[in-house]
Image: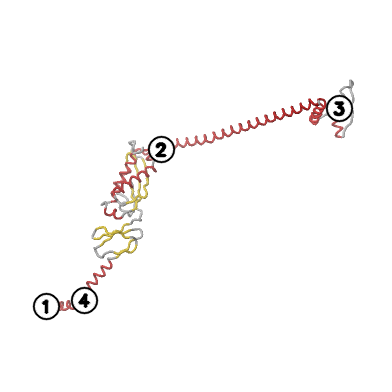
Amino acid sequence: MSEIKIDADAAREALKKLSPRLGLIIPAIIVLAGAFTSYFTVPTDSEAVVLRFGKYNRTAAPGLNFKLPFWFETKEIIPVDRRLKMEFGYGTAGSTNPFQTRPKEFYEEQSMITGDKNAAAVEWVIQYRISDPEAYLFKVRDPEETMRDASESVMREVVGDRTVDEVITIGRESIAADALVKLQELVDSYGLGLKIDQLQLKNVNPPRQVQSSFNEVNQAQQDKAKQINVAKGLYNKAVPKGEGEADQKISAAEGEKLQRVNEATGDAERFLALFEEYQKAPEITRQRLYLEKIQVVLPRLKNKFIMDGEASKPLPLLDLNNALNGKGGAR
């Protein structure tokens, strides 16, 4: 008992010696803890929502920021510039966003009914950002889940307004555009604080039970469209060619017509001028016409002979061809 009493006395003496120091150490620890909890850093792609006693107080920009220490003010880092993604009807492995996809048992969300009472399997993806951190945190309890449900509802509505051919073939872009507008309007009306940047349709197919038959029909439609395009190409090639040839022939005929009219007009004017001169001097004009015609005709003859038309008996002939070439003379 004496040993225990001695140890207790020693402990009291040591505590008395440390008590002045504890009065300094504890406040120092509190001050250091307050200093370390009074500042924080926000990444460049994010903003921080500062809560004072659990209530929204302000939004802090990227960089170094300060707040009240300890639990008086807390912060929530929101990646406002980070583009997030949600997938519907399928899932990509290894995604970091917990709201990007759902388990496989929820992939049946791709099954939809078109406006003409046919079934279609529609897969789509949306890319979005957090545009209003305060609304994102406080307006709705689960904004991502709410937007998933809203996206599925909007897609079913848009697909239900179109035929199966439009959904699977030619109407994909219009479906995506209409769904994006309607989904953003719905998200804004709920106050989710989200901004949808893109909505894109991925695989759009008929149900597996009829996919082979649909592929055959689709192939037949493509072959039909191909044949129509080939026929239109041949038509567009043949018709302009025929029209060009017709225009060419018409132009040639009009040119020939104009040429003949001009020639006939010139011949008539020349004849009238010649007739006028003939009336003035018939003999001289007749002689001139004779000589001009002989000048044209003689060079075309191979053998040329000069004879006396008034002679009653045969007379020697003058071979002009040989005489001109120096090979003969009068015979």
Q: Mark 3 or 1, which is nearer the eye?
A: 3
Kindly identify which residue carries mark 3: 306
Q: Where in the figure is residue 16, as x and y percent of width and height?
A: 17, 77
Residue at position x 32%, y 44% in the image: 154
- Residue type at the position of mark 4: Arg
Alpha carbons under labels 3 and 1: distance apart: 181 Å
Question: Reading the chain from its start, which is encountered first: label 1 or label 4?
Answer: 1
Residue at position x 56%, y 33% in the image: 243
Q: Is 16 rendered above or below residue 228?
A: below
User: Mark 1 and mark 2 in contact (Cβ < 8 Å)?
Assistant: no
Alpha carbons under labels 4 and 2: distance apart: 88 Å
* Mark 4 Cα shell of 10 Å, populated few (<14), some (14-19), many (≥20): few
Alpha carbons under labels 4 and 3: distance apart: 163 Å
Classify mark 4: helix, strand or loop: helix
Residue at position x 28%, y 64% in the image: 67
Question: Reading the chain from its start, which is encountered first: label 2 or label 1?
Answer: 1
Question: Reading the chain from its start, which is encountered first: label 3 or label 1?
Answer: 1
Alpha carbons under labels 2 and 1: distance apart: 100 Å
* Mark 2 Cα shell of 10 Å, populated few (<14), some (14-19), many (≥20): some
Q: Is 159 rendered above or below residue 64?
A: above
Alpha carbons under labels 1 and 4: distance apart: 25 Å
Q: Where in the figure is residue 331, as x and y percent of width and height?
A: 90, 28
* Mark 1 Cα shell of 10 Å, populated few (<14), some (14-19), many (≥20): few
Is residue 70 visible in this depiction of the protein? yes
Kindly identify which residue carries mark 4: 21
